[in-house]
Image (cartoon, rainbow, N blue to C red):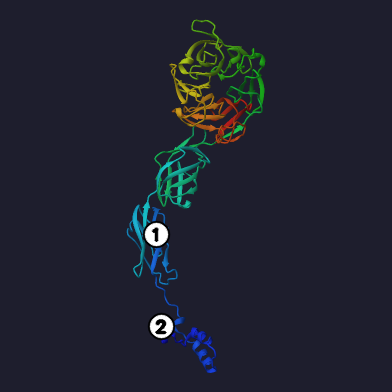
Amino acid sequence: MHSREENRPRFCGKKAFAALMNRQPISLSLFLALIFFAGCECDDDKVHPVSTVGISLDKKEWTLSVGIPGSLVASFEPADATQQEVLWKSSNPAVATVDDNGQISTLQAGSATISATLKNGGYDVCFLEVTDPSIVDFNLKEAAHGAELHIQGKGFSAKELENSVTLNGVPAKLVFSTREMLKVEVQKDARCTGPERQCTGPVEVSVGGKTVAAGTPFTYLPTVIVSTLTTQIAHLSGIVMDEEGNFYVTAPLLHTVYKVSPQGASTLFVGRAEFEGPPDGNRRGPHGIAMGRDGNFYVADTINDRIRIFTKEGRVSTLQVQDSDGNDMVLQQPRGIAVDPRTGDLYVTTNEPGDNSIYKLTLEPGGQRASASLFVRGSDASFLEPRGMAMDKNGNLYVANYARSIIQKISQDGRAVTLAGRLGVHGFQDGTGSEAMFDGPSDIVVDADGNLYVTEFGNHLIRKLTPEGKVSTLAGDTTQAPIVRGSEDGPGSKAQFNNPQGLIIDARTGIFYVADYSNQRIRKIVFE
């Protein structure tokens, strides 16, 4: 119940004037009085302070990295409260401090409670955890320029500009960040060029002035560029290079050998008459080709079961092969051929059904005769269509076991072990040892560091193997399954091949050349 006094109009201020003006009738004297009192100030016209009843912080729990600042925002109840004085305080100033505006500075790893207190005693708190950055793992242990590296860890900043990442000392481009994930783009490392110049170093993340390194290193892979060297030469198989940089390539369907200049101009070098024989299923004329220490070329004449010799002037002869008893010997369907750079001995793979083996040929003075011995019996090594071979500086022979889809290493005593791939399993997968898969490895070369490079006829790729058997893809588009054949030039991961066969590496420049069989061209692979 309200009293009469409480209901009586108060004659002061604009509110009183408005209230009385609404009453009818009104005298002139009263109207003049109201004008006077309207100009008077009363309590109703004053702005009264609104007390703050409660306070709430925008974050109740929060994690920040050392050196990364933060800001807490307080809201008040009621929303129009005019008394908003707040006392900010940190329970552990050694870990984090807070100023009068709620701005937080993080000093070292640890925990702190940030409180905001009103004059009337109302308060709210935020439980703050301050962490050092740490790296748990990253997805690509080796990658080339442009690859996206994902770094998992803790203590990163969600603001991209507050993080920095280096790979082997080279700043990476940050493209995404959260507290537990950084995504960066690998940048070009100008120090790492050529197949043997892979740079390995730490993955380092810096946040708020604190730098941490991953437990495992990152290897920068030089980017490769694939281009086309020659115009069309029908179905190339073997390839070799002389000291002047000229190429000699076998064309088995045409039973010929072509000479190609360093600029890509091709001419017929050894004609059809020298290699042509009676058709017999898949037995087609010359395949493997190698350059001997005497400067002559040795060619596996598959269709005619013989090894042919030709000089740089184009003179052709047949190597006379004899067994250990001095009897003439026929090598059935010779396919691959390699030269021991230390002794000049030849190694030849045979693909005759029932005789998938490797023979060692020791040349006699003059280079026209050779003594043959069985180096590896096919049944002892699970050979099935062994093709290209290469020998490292220690005398180990590496074989592309085509139909078994494995790469094998053979010591000088003839013992064979599988370096990579799964016996008889055809497919595609990078990895180490039996984790990796191939589809029809065809030819193989070795660099000065013992790394192997393999053409893959079935997968249309160029693969790389370390001496430990770790397999990666050097060139070829693997983004689709099954892998699409093609003839596209460009960066290694986007280039395409079509049944690549022969492969060589120019030791002087580190450039690879591929006899791209179904594209009928020589392809060139250059490292940045």
Residue 125 is situated, as x and y percent measured from the top left of the image, at 36, 61
| Residue at the image point whose x is 55% and y is 27% from the top | 456
Name the outermost residue toward the bottom: 29
The three-letter code of the residue at mark 2 reads His
Quadrant (top left/top right/bottom left/bottom right) for the N terminus: bottom left
Answer with the quarter of the image where residue 239 lies. Answer: top right
User: In front: mark 2 or mark 1?
Assistant: 2
Q: For numbered disc 2, what is the local secondary structure?
A: loop
Residue nearest the observer in this picture, 526 or 476: 476
Position above or below: 98 against 42: above
Label 1 crowd bin: few (<14), some (14–19), many (20+), radius 10 Å: many
Nearest the viewer among 333 and 59 is 59
In the picture, the quarter occupied by the C terminus is top right
Task: Say which label, 2 or 1, has the lower sequence index.
Answer: 2
Q: Residue at x 66, y 27 (%)?
A: 232
Q: Is residue 195 visible?
A: no
Q: Which label is found at residue 104?
A: 1
Could you tell me which secondary element the residue under label 1 belongs to?
strand
Tell me which amino acid carries mark 1.
Ile
| Labels 2 and 1 touching (C-beta < 8 A) | no
Q: Which residue is mark 2?
A: 2
Give left or right: position of 449 versus 130.
right
- Residue found at x 49% / y 7%: 324
Q: Disc 2 to disc 1, how far (Cα)?
A: 53 Å
Instruction: Report x, y in % for residue 206.
Output: 42, 48
The part of the image, by quadrant, that contains residue 50 is bottom left
Q: Image quadrant of residue 460?
A: top right
Residue 470 point in image, percent of width and height = 46, 30
Residue 288 - label: none
Query: Whole-percent x and y of residue 378?
Result: 49, 15
Residue 362 visible in the current orientation: yes
